Image (cartoon, helix red, strand yellow):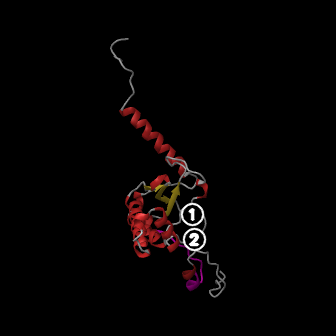
């Protein structure tokens, strides 16, 4: 194996944050009752809300539904990849190719899924929306997955997440129909 160039050039993607003073000014302009809110309080409110959402994803097997019908986030258990996942540090130390093995989770992989295809209210340009978990969220999700990997929904590589949600909606609708059948007025099962 060829050793990587540790001192080589790196590409760093530009990061965009909405927790800025400009966003706070727009919020104050739209909602004047929050004129006394400062940037630290604003950030604290957003981060607290995000941590509550994060805990919801970790604690609930089926994940969470985002507010305003923006979609769903859940953690899924996936089979091991066909591509080798090489541990470069150990490979360089041992001189032979060493791959990562997920012994804690029976070789299963954790993936955090976001979908907005089955949102209750369709919104414009939903194909543009994406979700990228923060480093803290990924770390906490990994620890939770190692503790109880069998709890999470199994997602096969060929399975569409949107189809899973549609199937769940159909079965829920059928359960509701079976519980409360709609009968016409004046219906008597003994009079034919």
User: Looking at the rendering, which quadrant does residue 103 occupy?
Assistant: bottom left
Query: Alpha-carbon neighbours of circle 2 within 10 Å: few (<14), some, or many (≥20)?
Result: few
Magenta segment boundaries in residue numbering: 91-102
User: Looking at the rendering, which quadrant does residue 67 occupy?
Assistant: bottom left
Residue occupying image coordinates x 42% and y 65%: 50
Q: Is residue 95 magenta?
A: yes
Q: Is residue 128 magenta?
A: no
Q: Do residues under tags 1 and 2 come within 8 Å of each other at their CB atoms? A: yes
> At which x and y percent is residue 13?
61, 75
Q: Mark 2 points at which residue?
A: 85
Residue occupying image coordinates x 45% and y 40%: 171
The reply, left or right, for residue 101 in relation to residue 41 is right
Nearest the eye: 151 or 164: 164
Nearest the eye: 111 or 146: 111
> At which x and y percent is residue 94?
56, 84
Q: Name the residue under label 1.
A: 81
> At which x and y percent is residue 137?
45, 69
> At which x and y percent is residue 6?
62, 86
Residue placed farthest to the top in the image?
192
Above or below 35: residue 161: above
Q: Considering the image in quadrants, where does the C terminus appear? A: top left
**SS of the residue under disc 2:** loop
């Amino acid at each position: 194996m060829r050793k990587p160039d540790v001192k080589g050039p790196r590409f760093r993607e530009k990061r965009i944050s909405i927790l800025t003073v400009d966003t706070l000014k727009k919020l104050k302009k739209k909602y004047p009752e929050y004129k006394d809110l400062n940037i630290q309080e604003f950030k604290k409110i957003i981060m607290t809300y995000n941590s509550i959402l994060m805990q919801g994803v970790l604690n609930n097997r089926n994940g969470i539904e985002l507010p305003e019908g923006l979609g769903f986030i859940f953690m899924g258990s996936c089979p091991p990849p066909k591509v080798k996942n090489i541990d470069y540090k150990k490979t360089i130390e041992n001189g032979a190719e060493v791959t990562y093995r997920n012994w804690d989770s029976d070789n299963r992989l954790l993936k955090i899924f976001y979908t907005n295809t089955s949102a209750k209210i369709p919104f414009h340009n939903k194909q543009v929306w994406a979700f990228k978990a923060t480093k803290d969220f990924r770390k906490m999700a990994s620890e939770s997955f190692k503790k109880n990997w069998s709890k999470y929904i199994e997602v096969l590589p060929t399975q569409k997440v949107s189809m899973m949600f549609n199937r769940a909606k159909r079965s829920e609708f059928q359960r509701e129909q079976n519980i409360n059948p709609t009968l016409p007025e004046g219906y008597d099962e003994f009079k034919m």
